Image: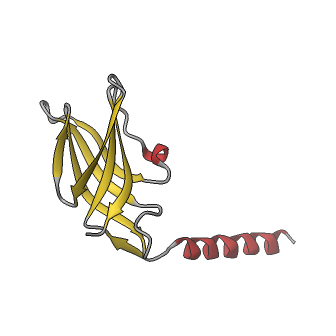
Amino acid sequence: MMRFFNTFVGLFLCASAVHAQQAVSSGTGAELRVLDKVSGQSSNYDLTSGGKMEVGRLTVALRACRYPEGAPSNDAFAYIEVTETESAASVFGGWMIASSPALNAMEHSRYDVWVLRCKTS
């Protein structure tokens, strides 16, 4: 019985992994939100893929933005790199998911940066 159970669990996990893979499209850029925790001011910015911008003491670079095929505002995920502008010290580098920004959040004493959605034009 245990052998049957292990086989069933293995097949279920394989089927789940295949189902979890879905077609994605690449956006031309992303809409990001930046919160200055000291002033309480938040602002939205459009950034093109491969582009950089300076926000306060940070430089934010967008490497890629991807989304489920046909739904650019649903579950977008973007690869961003954030550095301190003056020292070029790395603050964050990795994928952020728009629907769950806390999964891979940027840790900074003054600023929060997160992805809102991919841009398609």
Colour scheme in use: secondary structure
Along the line of sight, the residue nearer the viewer: 103 or 37: 37
Residue 33 in the image, given as x and y percentages of width and height:
34, 44
Residue ID at (36%, 27%): 40
Residue ID at (36%, 66%): 66
Would residue 81 be found to the left or right of residue 40 on screen? left
Outermost residue on the top side: it is: 38
Along the line of sight, the residue nearer the viewer: 34 or 91: 34
For the image, the number of numbered tags is: 0
**64 up-or-down from 96: above or below:** below
Residue 15 in the image, given as x and y percentages of width and height:
63, 76
Would residue 25 be found to the left or right of residue 49 on screen? right
**57 up-or-down from 16: above or below:** above
Along the line of sight, the residue nearer the viewer: 106 or 5: 106
Outermost residue on the right side: it is: 1
Outermost residue on the left side: it is: 86
Residue 90 in the image, given as x and y percentages of width and height:
23, 38
The quarter of the rendered structure image containing the N terminus is bottom right
Residue ID at (48%, 47%): 103
Give the quadrant of residue 20. Answer: bottom right
**13 up-or-down from 56: above or below:** below
The quarter of the rendered structure image containing the C terminus is bottom left
Residue 54 in the image, given as x and y percentages of width and height:
17, 40
Residue ID at (38%, 58%): 117
Would residue 75 be found to the left or right of residue 79 on screen? right
